[in-house]
Image (tube, rainbow, N blue to C red):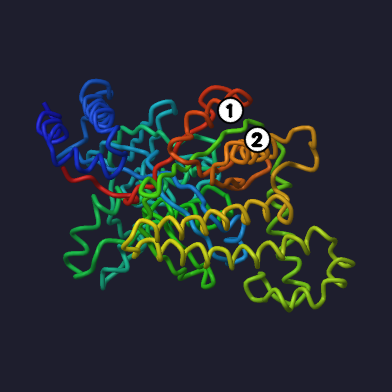
Amino acid sequence: MINTELTRKINSEHASDIFVKLYGQHEIESARKRYVSLINAMADEFQAEELKNASGDLRIFTSPGRTELAGNHTDHNRGKVLAASIQLDNAAVVQKRSDNIIFFRSAGFPDVKVKLTDASGSPDLKPKPEEMGTTEALIRGIAAELNRRFSSLKKEKSENDFFIGGFSANAESTVLPGSGLSSSAAVEVLIGRVLDSLYGDVLRSEASCEKLSPLEIAQIGQYAENVYFGKPCGLMDQAACSTGGVTAINFENADHPVVKQINFDLSAVGYALCVVNTGGSHADLTADYASIPAEMKSVAAFFGKQVLRELDKTTVLSRAAEIRKALGDRALLRAIHFFDENARVDKMTNILLEMESAKRDYEKHTAFYRYLKLVDESGDSSWKLLQNVFSPNNPASQGITAALALTKDFLSNQSYKGSCRVHGGGFAGTIQTYIPLDAIDSYRTCIEAVFGAGTVTPLRIRPAGAVELIF
């Protein structure tokens, strides 16, 4: 059977070490079962049509979701962001195909099938209007951009150069949809890493160059989402999912952002990072989300600039009265949030670097308490200045506001040191909390009594981004 050898490896001690790094000590056996189930399904459940053109060894890939630690709504104005990959991920068992078809199956979602060539065998990689907004569009866009990059490795080129091919994938995602944990970006960087690993090695060997970097894989995903899917997203989600660990990203140069990876073990200081799903619908929030970058950029345009990163806080405040009159108070407040949040990202990044190099436990704890204070400041700024904790069009629905208030009350009444902030885009969805490990159970009881069972999800920062697992 095609799964015997790989299954044996997944049950090895080496695999246990890998699973500890990705998912934590207590999730080794559940990880084994998950991957073995995906392998078995490749042989037992895939239709013969999907396997008849498959060849070669089975290979395993994983890409994580991500959580934003600081930098709320700063990336679209070329600001700074602090994010982290998490243990919730997309796992996929993959096998090459010879017919230039990508077949992607993910539990709970419709199968996706994309033919990369036309009837004549020529590349069929241009955007298709009928695919706009679909997973098919993302896959075609990722394939197109990878093919273009691979083509650049060849000295002689033609319009019909085709350097990639198909694969069959059986996948499962544990990234909670609609939670602000970037389930779509996790899929994008997974597809990119799979194609790069399956088809790039021969070209790289000939050209004497290395595998695509995590940042390049992220940029390929962003390109597909912008051009093929039709969503003008930034790069933060893809970069965090692709890189792994805590990632500090500086978007000052949009084409060449600076990415720094930092090791950060929350359990070492006795804390857990959680998200709380407060419910609420994201429908009819498009205008709310769009208003944030639009108002920030309107302040930049007031000074003849494109984005706020081209200005500084002092310059903006020197003309605050004029901005209020021309653009309104909220635009001014959101601009202030941008500058303050950018500065906080630097401070929080420096603290994490300080913790990474600290030799004594008390030094780590002292630094971490300063970090928590900045988390609270970030949350308060989003609440009061950015104003994305509820929609002004629906003031009766304030799940995020309620969760923040209840969390602050819990921490205050129990005399715990902890922090909380809105997570992701805001207006509806999730909050993020830092809770002492010995308070997790009581916090879950408190919050889930209001928002329902299963609404508190502990996260674990994992060190690896989108990677192939070699057992």
Indicate whether 205 appears above or below 55. below
Which quadrant holds residue 136? Answer: top left
Image quarter (top left, top right, bottom left or bottom right) of the N terminus: top left
Q: CA distance from mark 2 to mark 1?
A: 8 Å
The residue where tag 1 is placed is 446
| Callout 2 crowding tier (Cα within 10 Å): few <14, some 14–19, many ≥20 | some
Q: Residue at x 58, y 50 (%)?
A: 231
Q: Secondary structure at mark 1?
A: helix
Closer to the camera, 122 or 76? 76
Horizontal side of 394 relative to 36 (left or right) equals right
Whichever of callouts 2 and 1 sits on the residue coming sooner in the sequence is 2
Please say if the residues under marks 2 and 1 sit with CB atoms less than 8 Å apart.
yes
Residue picked out by circle 2 = 406
**Tag count:** 2
Residue 100, how many percent across, how many down? 29, 43
In the image, residue 339 lies at what x, y percent?
Answer: 65, 68
Q: Residue at the right extreme?
A: 325
* Residue 370 located left or right of residue 429: left
Which quadrant is the C terminus positioned in? top left
Q: Residue at x 72, y 77 (%)?
A: 314
Residue 118: percent from the left, percent from the top? 37, 45
Q: Would residue 126 be seen by someone viewing this image from the given angle?
A: no
User: Image point 64% across, 76% down: which residue?
Assistant: 310
The amino acid type found where label 2 is placed reads Leu
